[in-house]
Amino acid sequence: MGLEVTLIGSKPVGEHPGKAVNLIPPEFINRHFVEEKHEHIDLIYFATSVTDNVIPEHGNDEWAWLSKDELEDPKYSLSETMKLYAKTALTKVNKKS
């Protein structure tokens, strides 16, 4: 389901076969409250894919691939945090290619 991706980031150092696997660290960690006693912690990763064909998890999910300029378009109603993540991801991906 979703999209097959390749994570971008620092490769983990050291492997311990059969005991532990070191993971690529997230680019950002975000803690936010949904309700007074209910919080979420998001681990934000950046990735590339060979396709832009997304298979939505839910029928009413909406997807859009945006350029750096389009991130500022008010019709997308993106938070400043989401814009920061997206701009940082685009910069990292462009440096890699």
Image (tube, grey):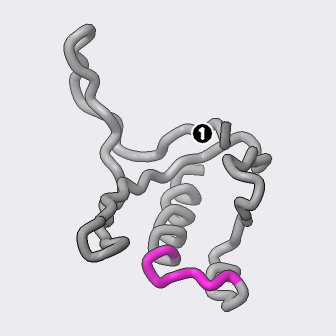
Q: Is residue 79 magenta?
A: yes
- Rendering coords of residue 91 (x, y %): 52, 65
Q: Is residue 2 magenta?
A: no
- Rendering coords of residue 78 (x, y %): 57, 81
Write the residue at 47% across / 45% down: 8
Q: Residue furthest bottom?
A: 74
Left or right: 36 as drawn, with respect to 48: left
13 versus 62 height, above or below: above
Q: Which residue is mark 1?
A: 5
Left or right: 47 as drawn, with respect to 23: right
54 versus 73 height, above or below: above
Q: Which residues are magenta?
A: 76-82
Q: Nearer the viewer, residue 48 or 64?
A: 64
Q: Residues within 10 Å of mark 1 (few under 14, many from 20)?
A: few
Q: How many marks?
A: 1
Q: Quadrant of residue 1?
A: top right
Write the residue at 68% across / 81% down: 76
Q: Quadrant of residue 28?
A: bottom left
- Rendering coords of residue 19 (x, y %): 20, 13
SS state under label 1: loop
Left or right: 8 as drawn, with respect to 42: right
Q: Nearer the viewer, residue 56 or 38?
A: 38
- Rendering coords of residue 31 (x, y %): 28, 66
Write the residue at 58% across / 59% down: 94
Q: Could you tell me the amino acid type at mark 1?
A: Val
